[in-house]
Image (cartoon, coloured by chain):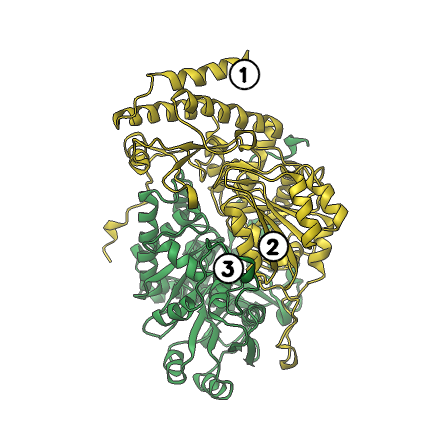
Chain colours: A green, B yellow
């Protein structure tokens, strides 16, 4: 093998303004470059306890079991679903974008009986629609997506916890895309489980999923407890129907590893934990509500700029996430060519879309470390340049002026 | 929340000489501190392709599907088992330590019919023992552990591939603890799947699992293919018995993400990938065989030193891994007190043990970045000091002299 073809890592400088991943906060990368310590070193278990406490702050919860899953955001989703869903359980999934379909898919893998309700992409559900479906389906779990990046929509969750309590339904939300950039009140909203990811508003690299579990969810999971070390005889090898389909995602074991017993399970991904700790620490230092307001400020400035450029936006703006905007690609330009020029000539990445929106919508994110004025202004300016270069004529400077006006108004 | 209690990360300096995790190579940590790029950025997909090629070199394979799982080493194990094992499949697991039990446990979660053979801890199997069991059980898969850190033993695998071919059995090994510190020839030995981890001889942080799959294993997995995006109707929701129990670990999907189609699945953990790339690059730069010889040199020097101190070792030394040694705790001292003094007063971590060896054996590793003379000499010197401080009298300096003699002999 000719190793001269593989020099040390040297990624190009990019401003990541898509739907995530976005640029990591340099302080997070520095925290991750700390040297390792052993997994049972008192310093390590202390850091694990700190991570639990810091994420309680970000999840707005008192839940004891607030911890990290060592995998990307969908690992957190799967850990919760595979641990909570027993084969044959009925689950209800309100689908308003791609990630609702993902919840259905994972639930099917868990051998759930999956029921869905749907709204057209670009819309969200009313609480009544969800309550009606709960009455009809009588599910054991309600599986929701808070913010679906595929459509940029934010499903209101405030009223769903009370509905779930009324019908004895466990209430889960996937907050990967929305977490820390939009309000989420785990306890006040009656959520039984929430999972998130690092690469959106948390400002870290993908690879870790913070989760939180209510006492009710803990009880459900504990009923399926399985102890790894037990040496079983041939008489046991058919197993128990109720045994969780995964060892890696068995939240009973993961609780025993994060809890005072410290029962050995996986070897906690130390660098990732250092990064996740720094993300939460920075968010709480800024103040969670201040951070959410910052996401709204820059998200709205981007929106004003895009509108000022004469472009149309996607979906119901009343229910848009703060941190990502769908922009209708003008018919006169090729969306992929615009993205290519943005990336190659300006070093700025904006996102494409999935499914029914493919080729029709760009998704532009303002999140985490990149929820900043300079990122918004650079992106608008570059997009105006590229669009005009390709023949879409907008009023010169109007986009940036609209953003400036928004910033002035918001400050004044 | 009083944030002054949560200062920036500042782990204590530790020399990690246990069974892993060990200190990461600083070059790996620096690679991981690079800024992020988008998951479909041409620079990112190029790095993904490079990682595949580099790990083909470390696995000694031509296998196309040589890639990373975003999770710790047991995530790699589970991805292979859950993707390959159909419910009811017979698997044979030769168990010679804790990690054999882990393979059984995960296989049971996959609803396999699990058959085991066992030898006492501290021993390994002969090829005949395994062939006899294959003839009797007629398994679809043979699941082995190459190096079981719980006992420090290394199972010889060279002859097992031919046996597996003869009986039409798929051959998997968990090389987490042994990979890159002991010979492993994926293709020459006829392995159909291998998984590894970063935190042992690869010299990186836990959190990523390199795997490789033979064409035969790929074919088995492709038969269970499931496309995520398909929107299913109520008529489908019972699913297919053969559907893999996991989305996150569905290797068919992960191949489609790493392959030219680049079908969206998880968001690759970019920082972890940068680190894994650097680990493989450094190993190939040193030369894989040179690196294995380095592990043997320092592992043997540690062994000579421990023997020179008058301590006994654990297990069959003919079958010891190069990178970890079991040391019998002398009856006159408390093993945990020794470990505590080593950690607190010398900053050196050595390992405890699991199961039947608890309280009886320390495990001392010389692996990855810490397979170095200075690490061996510091550890021996500190251990001599602590043992004598606690009343176990050894000849002053004998351990270090034995190690020096070994180094001189090996060089001369």
Q: Secondary structure at mark 3?
A: helix
Q: Which residue position is annotated with label 1? A: B410
Q: Which mark is residue A75?
A: 3
Q: Position of residue B217 (x, y in %)?
A: 70, 52
Q: Which mark is residue B115?
A: 2
Subunit ID for the residue under disc 3: A
Q: Position of residue B387 (x, y in %)?
A: 30, 27
Say whether residue A345 is visible.
no
Residues packed near mark 3 inside 10 Å, few (<14), some (14 to 19) or many (20 plus): many
Q: CA distance from mark 3 to mark 2?
A: 30 Å
Q: Secondary structure at mark 1?
A: helix
Subunit ID for the residue under disc 1: B
Q: Secondary structure at mark 2?
A: strand
Q: At x 55% / y 49%, what residue is drawn?
A: A347
Subunit ID for the residue under disc 2: B
Residues packed near mark 1 inside 10 Å, few (<14), some (14 to 19) or many (20 plus): few
């Amino acid at each position: 093998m000719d190793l001269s073809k593989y020099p040390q890592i040297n990624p190009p400088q990019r401003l990541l303004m898509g739907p995530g991943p976005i640029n990591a906060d340099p302080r997070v990368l520095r925290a991750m470059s700390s040297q390792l310590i052993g997994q049972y070193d008192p310093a390590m278990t202390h850091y694990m306890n700190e991570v639990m406490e810091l994420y309680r702050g970000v999840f707005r919860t008192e839940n004891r079991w607030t911890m990290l899953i060592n995998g990307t955001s969908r690992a957190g989703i799967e850990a919760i679903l595979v641990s909570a869903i027993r084969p044959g359980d009925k689950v209800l999934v309100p689908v308003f974008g791609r990630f609702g379909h993902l919840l259905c898919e994972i639930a099917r893998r868990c051998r759930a009986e999956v029921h869905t309700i749907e709204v057209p992409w670009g819309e969200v559900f009313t609480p009544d629609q969800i309550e009606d479906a709960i009455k009809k389906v009588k599910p054991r779990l309600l599986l929701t997506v808070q913010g679906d990046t595929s459509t940029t929509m934010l499903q209101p969750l405030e009223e769903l916890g009370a509905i779930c309590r009324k019908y004895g339904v466990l209430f889960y939300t996937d907050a990967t895309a929305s977490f820390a950039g939009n309000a989420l009140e785990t306890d006040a909203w009656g959520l039984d489980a929430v999972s998130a990811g690092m690469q959106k508003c948390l400002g870290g690299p993908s690879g870790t999923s913070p989760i939180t579990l209510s006492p009710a969810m803990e009880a459900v999971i504990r009923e399926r407890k399985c102890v790894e070390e037990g040496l079983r005889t041939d008489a046991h090898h058919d197993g128990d129907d109720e045994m969780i389909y995964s060892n890696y995602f068995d939240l009973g074991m993961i609780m025993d590893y994060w809890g005072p017993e410290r029962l050995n399970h996986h070897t906690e991904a130390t660098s990732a934990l250092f990064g996740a700790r720094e993300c939460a620490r920075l968010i709480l230092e800024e103040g969670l509500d201040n951070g959410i307001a910052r996401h709204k400020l820059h998200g709205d400035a981007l929106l004003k700029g895009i509108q000022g450029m004469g472009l149309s936006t996607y979906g119901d703006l009343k229910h848009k996430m703060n941190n990502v905007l769908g922009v209708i690609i003008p018919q006169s330009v090729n969306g992929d060519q615009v993205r290519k020029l943005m990336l190659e000539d300006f070093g700025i990445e904006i996102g494409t879309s999935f499914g029914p929106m493919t080729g029709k919508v760009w998704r532009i994110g303002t999140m985490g470390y990149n929820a900043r004025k300079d990122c918004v202004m650079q992106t608008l300016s570059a997009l105006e340049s590229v669009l005009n270069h390709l023949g879409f004529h907008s009023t010169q400077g109007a986009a940036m002026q609209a953003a400036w006006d928004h910033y002035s108004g918001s400050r004044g």
